[in-house]
Amino acid sequence: MNAIIIEDEKLSAEHLITLLKKIDPSILVTDVFDSVSRSVEELSKGKSADILFLDIQLSDGLSFDIFSKILIDTPVIFTTAYNEYAVKAFQLNSVDYLLKPIGIEDLRRAVDKFKKYNRQDSSLLLNNIASAFQSIRKEYKTRFLVKSGETIISVKSDDILHFVFEDGIVLLMTSGGKRYPADFTLDQLESLLDPIQFFRINRKVIIHVESIEKTSPYFNGRLKLTASRLNDDDARIVSRDRVFGFKQWLGK
């Protein structure tokens, strides 16, 4: 069985080749392409294989772009470094994947499945893959530029405990205890922040999941949070109309 690997990280490609040799010495990796453009160029020339291993995020775009440019009817196994929540989208749509770093047993399972694969279903499979990924391909802000005096500071989203609206401005609180004005409204931030990490609990606060220590029932169907560096009682209350969504979010 011949295989083509489309992967822009050399070490990841070499690791995959090594594992393939271990699980099935008859699998021959004939080519390794490192970008969307090169993959399209080479596959358009007639390069083919029995199976493709595709990294989702390549140096010049998403591997889905390959399918929009040329017809591919070869079984595909996607490799991804996306987190567990993103992978759930693939599971729900019956799409096979390998989560990096790739383990030998996971690879063996995927190869065995594709040995039984029906090529006639490939177009449907690729459509399912593309649909599944639409929910996770949006790029959210990973850092914010803030001012401290005359200095501009870059704050990673992962280092932000919460955003809070106080005295007519939105402030962000860092895990190091620093507070900076943010040049966004809370409504704007809701669309800019990764909804897996952040949730708007009320009209005043958007909170990071890792900053929540515990939740307690509060009167009138609401919840009260204990969270890092969030001390204002009103700010710690999950609004009644947000409680259901909050519980779903926190339980993911």
Image (cartoon, helix red, strand yellow):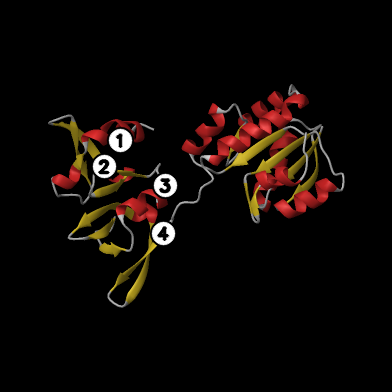
Q: Give the answer, above or below, for where 63 lies relative to 95.
A: below
Residue topped by disc 2: 201
Q: What is the secondary structure assignment of the residue under circle 1?
A: helix
Residue topped by disc 1: 246
Q: Identify residue type, mark 3.
A: Asp
Check residue 143 in the rendering and tell me which mark sits there, or answer none.
4
- Asked whether 162 or 103 is in front, the reply is 162
Q: What is the secondary structure assignment of the residue under circle 4?
A: strand
Tag 2 and tag 1, C-beta contact below 8 Å: yes
For label 2, the crowd category at 10 Å Cα-Cα, with few meaning under 14, some 14 to 19 and many 20 or more, is: many
Q: Quadrant of residue 95?
A: top right
Q: CA distance from mark 3 to mark 4?
A: 11 Å
Q: Which residue is at the far bottom?
A: 150
Q: Position of residue 68 (x, y in %)?
A: 71, 44
Q: Position of residue 245 (x, y in %)?
A: 32, 33
Q: Residue at x 51, y 42 (%)?
A: 136
- Asked whether 128 or 173 is in front, the reply is 128
Give the label, 4 or 2, closer to the camera: 2
Tag 4 and tag 2, C-beta contact below 8 Å: no
Q: Residue at x 14, y 45 (%)?
A: 234
For label 3, the crowd category at 10 Å Cα-Cα, with few meaning under 14, some 14 to 19 and many 20 or more, is: some
For label 4, the crowd category at 10 Å Cα-Cα, with few meaning under 14, some 14 to 19 and many 20 or more, is: some
Q: What is the secondary structure assignment of the residue under circle 2?
A: loop
Residue topped by disc 3: 194
Mark 3 or mark 2, earlier in chain:
3
Mark 4 or mark 2, earlier in chain:
4
